Image (cartoon, rainbow, N blue to C red):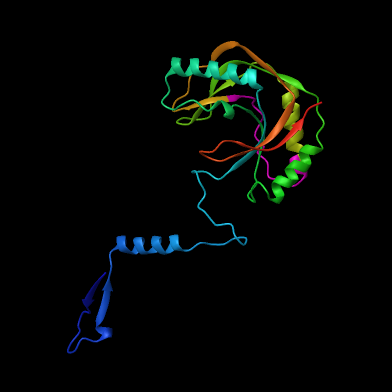
């Protein structure tokens, strides 16, 4: 900071004759330093930290492939990535999933929204079923297309579970993603759309569904698991 004499000052130097001149950089530096020294205690001991990642946490019910199916998906994903040469990398194998239904949970993983979603899932009774994928295609719009495993088959049982979740979650008063169910497994993201490709049939038997918390740059957190009869 630089202390300057005020404009129009005369005679003796008095405190009122001075004005403070400080650069914008110094203002930001001082503010940041003060902010870092201030720790907000939310609940008697847990520190407040800025959220990691670029997006808020996302919550969704999903189907996960078993170990054998996950290995097969990963092998197909590597072959396609090598063939198509997209700029963006492959997803991690533990991120392969079929989204059934997304929900809004602004109160976080231990809040009322998640508690209600668990209660809804507890009441669902469905038999186990198989899912099958035999295509790969781009979903979404450029420059953030999701290149994914897709299927030409009608996955009636998976669609039924997705619809049951949608109706039950809405009835419970939760805010739910109401878009039409399109079963797919995202392999990687791409800047441009690709032509659909036919693939050998990849099938696995679904024996449970899960509730996932997804936060950028972290592994998926499984918040609940529900078996299918």
Quadrant assignment, res 166: top right
Residue positioned 66% across, 22% down in the render: 66
Whether residue 32 appears in magenta in the rendering, the answer is no
Residue 175 shown left or right of residue 94 in the figure: right
Residue 9 shown left or right of residue 35 in the figure: left
Residue at the farthest front position: 45
State the quadrant of the N terminus: bottom left
Residue 73 shown left or right of residue 26 in the figure: right
State the count of labels: 0
Depth check, front residue: 60 or 151:
60
Q: Position of residue 141 (x, y in %)?
A: 50, 30
Which residues are drawn in magenta? 169-185
- Which SS does the magenta portion mostly show? loop
Residue positioned 47% across, 19% down in the render: 81
Q: Position of residue 28 (x, y in %)?
A: 35, 61
Quadrant assignment, res 154: top right
Residue positioned 74% across, 22% down in the render: 156
Quadrant assignment, res 218: top right
Q: Is 141 above or below relative to 13?
A: above
Residue 45 shown left or right of residue 1 in the figure: right
Q: Position of residue 110 (x, y in %)?
A: 68, 49
Whether residue 183 appears in magenta in the rendering, the answer is yes
Depth check, front residue: 101 or 203:
203
Q: Is 73 above or below relative to 146?
A: above
Q: Position of residue 192 (x, y in %)?
A: 44, 25
């Amino acid at each position: 900071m630089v202390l300057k004499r005020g404009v129009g000052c005369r005679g003796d130097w008095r405190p009122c004759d001075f004005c403070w001149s400080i650069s914008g950089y110094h203002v930001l530096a001082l503010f940041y330093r003060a902010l870092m020294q201030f720790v907000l205690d939310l609940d008697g001991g847990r520190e407040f930290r800025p959220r990691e990642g670029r997006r808020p946490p996302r919550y969704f019910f999903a189907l996960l492939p078993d170990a054998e199916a996950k290995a097969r998906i990963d092998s197909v994903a590597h072959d396609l990535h090598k063939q198509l040469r997209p700029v963006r990398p492959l997803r991690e194998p533990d991120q392969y999933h079929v989204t059934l239904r997304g929900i809004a949970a602004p109160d976080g993983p231990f809040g009322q929204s998640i508690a209600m979603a668990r209660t809804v899932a507890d009441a669902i009774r469905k038999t186990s079923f198989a899912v099958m994928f035999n295509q790969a295609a781009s979903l979404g719009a450029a420059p953030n297309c999701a290149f994914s495993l897709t299927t030409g088959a009608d996955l009636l049982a998976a669609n039924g579970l997705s619809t049951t979740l949608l109706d039950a979650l809405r009835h419970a008063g939760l805010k739910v993603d109401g878009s039409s169910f399109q079963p797919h497994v995202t392999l990687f993201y791409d800047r441009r759309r690709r032509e659909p490709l036919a693939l050998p049939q990849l099938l696995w038997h679904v024996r449970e569904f899960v509730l996932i918390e997804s936060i950028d740059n972290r592994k998926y957190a499984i918040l609940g698991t529900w078996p299918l009869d």
